[in-house]
Amino acid sequence: MTHLTTTTRHGLHRLPSLNSGEDRLRLFAGSANLPLAQEISRYLGIELGPMVRKNFADGEVYVQVQESIRGCDVYLIQPTCRPVNDHLTELLIMIDACRRASARQITAVMPYYGYARADRKTAGRESITAKLVANLIVQSGADRVIAMDLHSAQIQGYFDIPCDHVYGSPVLFDYLNEKKLPDLVVVSPDVGGVARARAFAKKLDDAPLAIIDKRRQSHNVAEVMNVIGDVSGKTAVLVDDMIDTAGTIYEAAKLLRKEGARQVYACATHAIFSPPAIDRLSSGVFEEVIVTNSTPVRQENYFPQLRVLSVADLLGETIWRVHEDTSVSSMFR
């Protein structure tokens, strides 16, 4: 029998197996980001499974799977974005419903993992919510997690089940490479993001690296101090995993302009965009703000400098490779 190799839009080569078990693969989507789930569905050529999701009068979530999934490998697509508690609860109930429906394996596909910022104790009497959420997902019955751009890599270790950590950066690389920006310097907006920025710079032809030294006074309030590295006359690309209120990245951009950067671009996987993020991002300090659709961007949050790139193909390819027991890490080499 002849095997035909399928080439994906990202140039990844897929070799189907003789017994792929594709008929066992089931996709279901929660309410958090249905457009992304539909794109993943189209990429894989598999229809989203029917599911009823509604709320009781007091706000309780009700979920029912509308087809038999006995013995199937089920993938539940649900970022835990705003409203975080509702979407997290919905995901846990979806997992429990599938477990009780005798699914063979349940994978939570989380393009955005909420509660990740509290990933360690920085003061007494704090909760490590990243670990707490991991425990909830495991206890609800998930067998595996696929997460994109976790706030810190250590969160993988919080799960007592396999966790595939994938990155949205390839779609950002492709976009930036097409623009052919001159004199690039990749900038980390804080010391904690240096490893992320260094990896990003390496993919952009080993671009030089700069670091913003800042001190945070309180949650969602950042005070920028100075720039470590040369940005004068260069095109600065600020790289972070998420943009929430945009305080950090906005202050960093203003400092880069002050230090002589010719252009400033912002790149992040997760566009949380809590107020006053839009006012800051559209204020003119950025040439472009480049994000992905890991979380939905509401129509009222669009502004002229915003570019939203799709990660549906990356997530679809990851789902396929996990289902076929082939390498996921090779996608990012």
Image (cartoon, rainbow, N blue to C red):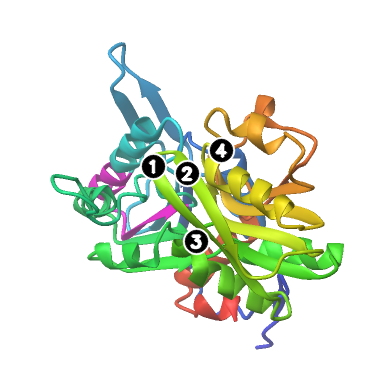
Name the residue beneath numbered marker 4.
34
Residue 23's disc is 3
Between residue 165 and residue 25, name the one nearer to us. 165
Image depth: mark 4 or mark 2 in front:
2
Disc 1 crowd, CA 10 A, few/some/many (<14, 14-19, 20+)? few
Marks 4 and 3: which is nearer the front?
4
Q: Amino acid at mark 2?
A: Ala
Asked whether the residues under the numbered discs 4 and 3 touch, taking CB atoms below 8 Å apart as contact, a structural biologist would say no
Q: Identify the mark nearer the N-term, 1 or 3.
A: 3
Which residue lies most toward the left here? 125
| Mark 3 residue type | Asp
Q: Along the line of sight, which residue is nearer the eye, 113 or 210?
A: 210
Q: Tell me what residue is drawn at x 68 percent, y 62 percent.
A: 171
What's the CA distance linking mark 4 and mark 3?
22 Å
Local packing at callout 2 (Cα closer than 10 Å; few below 14, some 14-19, many 20+) is some
In the image, 183 versus 273, the foreground residue is 183
Disc on res. 222: 2
Q: Residues within 10 Å of mark 4 (few under 14, many from 20)?
A: some
